[in-house]
Image (cartoon, rainbow, N blue to C red):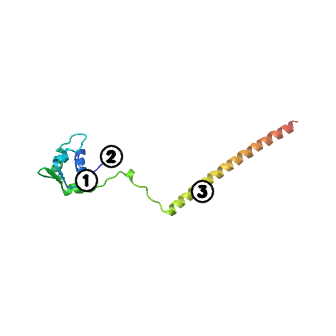
Amino acid sequence: MAIILPFPLSVQEMRVLQEYRRIGTDTLAADAIKSIKHPVGGGDAPAESLVAKGYLNRDGASYSLTEKAKEFLAIDAKPELEAPEPVLDKKELEAKREQRRAAKEAKRAAEVREREARVAAQAKRRQAVHDAKRKSR
């Protein structure tokens, strides 16, 4: 599931910024940025475009984060599917268990009534057949 962020950044630019988060530093050398693996593109072009957008500052042979980049890295976006289940208190859990027990008991009672009705109908048919045989003699 893709996480869509409201930033005008390319995938390569986000990877560069994420490398700062992964390493936990505010400054990276140009060689470290060039060594970041990108599926398409790479080199120092993403870092240069981040400088143009105001996310990085170029300090000679290294790049450092700006406040804008630090705000971006502070976002901890996660898909909603990974959110933990809400915890129910004991009263709610007990109420749900009681509902399930009551539903099972009602189902069993209905099955018993249905079985008894079939047995009674079968006995009534047998009695009717028996009575019909007696009358015909």
Alpha-carbon span between mark 2 and mark 1: 19 Å
Q: Are marks 2 and 1 in contact (CB under 8 Å)?
A: no
Q: Where is residue 88 in the image (x, y as percent from the top left)?
A: 47, 60
- The image quadrant that residue 74 belongs to is bottom left
Q: Position of residue 73 (x, y in %)?
A: 25, 54
- For the point 18% across and 49% down, which residue is it? 50
Check disc 1: other Cα within 10 Å, few if <14, some if 14-19, many if 20+.
some
Mark 2 lies on a secondary structure that is loop
Which residue lies under the disc numbered 2? Answer: 2
Q: Nearer the viewer, residue 132 or 31?
A: 31
Which residue lies under the disc numbered 1? Answer: 21
Check disc 3: other Cα within 10 Å, few if <14, some if 14-19, many if 20+.
few
- For the point 28% across and 55% down, which residue is it? 75
Q: What residue type is labelled 1?
A: Arg
Disc tally is 3
Which residue lies under the disc numbered 3? Answer: 102
Q: Do the residues labelled 2 and 3 touch (CB within 8 Å)?
A: no
Q: Where is residue 18 in the image (x, y as percent from the top left)?
A: 25, 50
Q: Position of residue 62 (x, y in %)?
A: 15, 51
Q: What residue type is labelled 3?
A: Ala
Alpha-carbon span between mark 2 and mark 3: 43 Å
Point out the frontmost of discs 1 and 3: 1
Q: Nearer the viewer, residue 71 or 102?
A: 71
Q: Which residue lies furthest to the top in this view?
A: 137
Mark 3 lies on a secondary structure that is helix
**In the drawing, does residue 63 fall left or right of residue 128?**
left
